[in-house]
Image (cartoon, rainbow, N blue to C red):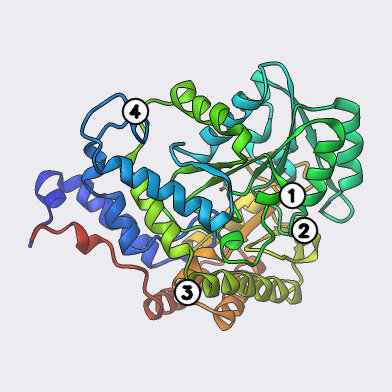
């Protein structure tokens, strides 16, 4: 039977089908990606995409909110219960918008924000110079200790005392170690700053109890909903009661119009899933897989930033092997192993061809892969890194990856858009 898309738009049908096959047939190691459940996909692809709901539950600017009010309230209640927060806003369209909304709520343009520098693992929106967060606010950036690849809380404190930021940001996009949020809280309090934590990468690990939570140590916590948390793509903000009014006003009407109710319903489903014992086991396995992959990669002679991982990701520093990230990532992609090239601390190579690879285990773990598969992936990466231009090795690895992917199927979604 033809799907509706196939009938209406053959070209788009083929493109979506191609992407679905690509996702099913690749080992996806980009640490910020995952596979959502069929339940999350159904909610996200539901009739809620047809509805405007500007405002907040019971205070909307449009009628017809009999169900949307309940959906948004449910999503907020689940977020607050899962993370132990006083309040939640689930309307941000993305993590970047959530961050900007929070800074705008807590600081005036031109005031100082302080976050981890992008080449050291921070996010663009933590005040990096090309992001508006680095233009609207005065941005001070801390770095990792180049000798250990670790956060240096003494340095952060020194910088905070010197610049006295209005907002101190913790959290990262490429930091493989556990973050001690209590240190950030202490430093922020000592200089009169707000502590904003961006837990986008680790939200699922926090929900699963395998990473300490930033919530008790932060004024405000932002997150995306689609990484380790395994929901649809979106943003979420958790806050202490005292910040509720400012944060909500900043998201709407400050930065956005109507919330994406289809996404919010998918987030609510993902939050329910994240509160289960199955999800706790998933989060544990994500970390076990990452640790095993990291250990194996080091056995194969790779340098890992900070010498390993505590969480879902690792960062290979390829400088010792005389390789750079982009050609190796492209060679791996030809073997259906998907990762991203990334700067490493102290990198002098340009960001478009940096010296590192960033790998993560959330997506492969969703497929049910465990330590033996993590070891196998490390062996394949090592084989291709030996000679990234040897197409016969790449083809051989590619065939083996395809076989492994068949043994660990992904949540089946495409059939769900068939008409019946
Ligand atoms: N959060 C980034 C990542 O880690 O991939 C994208 O903005």
Judged left or right of residue 206, residue 90 is: left
The label on residue 115 is none
Nearer to us in this view, 91 or 324:
91
Label 1: element kind: loop
Q: CA distance from mark 1 to mark 3?
A: 34 Å
User: Circles 1 and 4: CB distance less than 8 Å?
Assistant: no
Label 2: element kind: helix
Q: Ligand 1 within 8 A of label 2's CB?
A: no
Which of marks 2 and 3 precedes in the sequence?
3
User: Circles 2 and 1: CB distance less than 8 Å?
Assistant: yes
- Disc 4: which residue: 54
Between disc 3 and disc 2, the foreground one is: 3
The residue at 67%/47% (across/down) is 172
Which of marks 3 and 1 precedes in the sequence?
3
Look at the image and tell me whether residue 69 can be seen: yes
Label 2 neighbour load within 10 Å: few <14, some 14-19, many 20+: many
Which of marks 3 and 4 precedes in the sequence?
4
Q: CA distance from mark 4 to mark 3?
A: 35 Å
Between disc 4 and disc 3, the foreground one is: 4
- Disc 3: which residue: 278
Which quadrant would the N terminus be assigned to in this image? bottom left
Between disc 1 and disc 4, the foreground one is: 4
- Disc 2: which residue: 305
């Amino acid at each position: 039977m033809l799907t509706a898309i196939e009938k209406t738009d053959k070209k788009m049908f083929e493109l979506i089908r191609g992407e679905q096959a690509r996702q099913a047939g690749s080992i996806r190691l980009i640490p910020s990606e995952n596979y959502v459940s069929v339940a999350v996909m159904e909610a996200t692809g539901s009739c809620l995409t047809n509805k405007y709901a500007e405002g907040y539950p019971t205070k909307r600017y449009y009628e017809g909110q009999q169900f949307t009010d309940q959906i948004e309230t449910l999503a907020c209640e689940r977020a607050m219960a899962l993370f132990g927060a006083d309040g939640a806003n689930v309307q941000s369209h993305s993590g970047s918008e959530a961050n900007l909304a929070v800074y705008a709520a807590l600081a005036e343009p031109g005031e100082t924000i302080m976050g981890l520098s992008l080449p050291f693992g921070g996010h663009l929106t933590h005040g990096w110079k090309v992001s508006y967060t680095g233009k609207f606010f005065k941005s001070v950036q801390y770095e990792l200790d180049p000798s250990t690849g670790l956060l240096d809380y003494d340095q952060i404190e020194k910088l905070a005392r010197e610049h006295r930021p209005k907002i101190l940001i913790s959290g990262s996009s490429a930091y493989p170690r556990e973050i001690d949020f209590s240190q950030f809280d202490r430093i922020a309090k000592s200089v009169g700053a707000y502590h904003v934590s961006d837990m986008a990468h680790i939200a699922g690990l926090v929900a699963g109890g395998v990473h300490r939570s930033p919530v008790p140590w932060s004024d405000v916590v932002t997150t995306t909903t689609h990484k380790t948390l395994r929901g649809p793509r979106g943003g979420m903000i958790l806050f202490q009661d005292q910040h509720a009014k400012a944060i909500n006003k900043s998201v709407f009407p400050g930065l956005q119009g109507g919330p994406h109710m289809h996404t919010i319903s998918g987030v609510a489903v993902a939050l329910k899933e994240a509160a289960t014992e199955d999800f706790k086991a998933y989060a544990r396995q994500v970390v076990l897989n990452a640790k095993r992959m990291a250990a194996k990669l080091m056995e194969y002679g790779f340098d890992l930033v900070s010498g390993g991982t505590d969480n879902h990701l690792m960062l290979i520093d390829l400088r010792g092997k005389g390789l750079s990230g982009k050609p190796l990532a492209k060679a791996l992609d030809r073997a259906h192993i998907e990762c991203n090239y990334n700067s490493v601390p102290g990198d002098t190579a340009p960001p478009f061809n940096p010296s590192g690879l960033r790998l993560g285990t959330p997506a492969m773990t969703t497929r049910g892969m465990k330590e033996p598969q993590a070891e196998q992936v490390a062996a394949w990466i090592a084989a291709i890194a030996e000679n990234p231009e040897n197409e016969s090795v790449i083809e051989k690895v590619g065939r083996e990856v395809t076989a492994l992917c068949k043994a660990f199927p992904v949540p089946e979604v495409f059939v769900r858009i068939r008409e019946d």
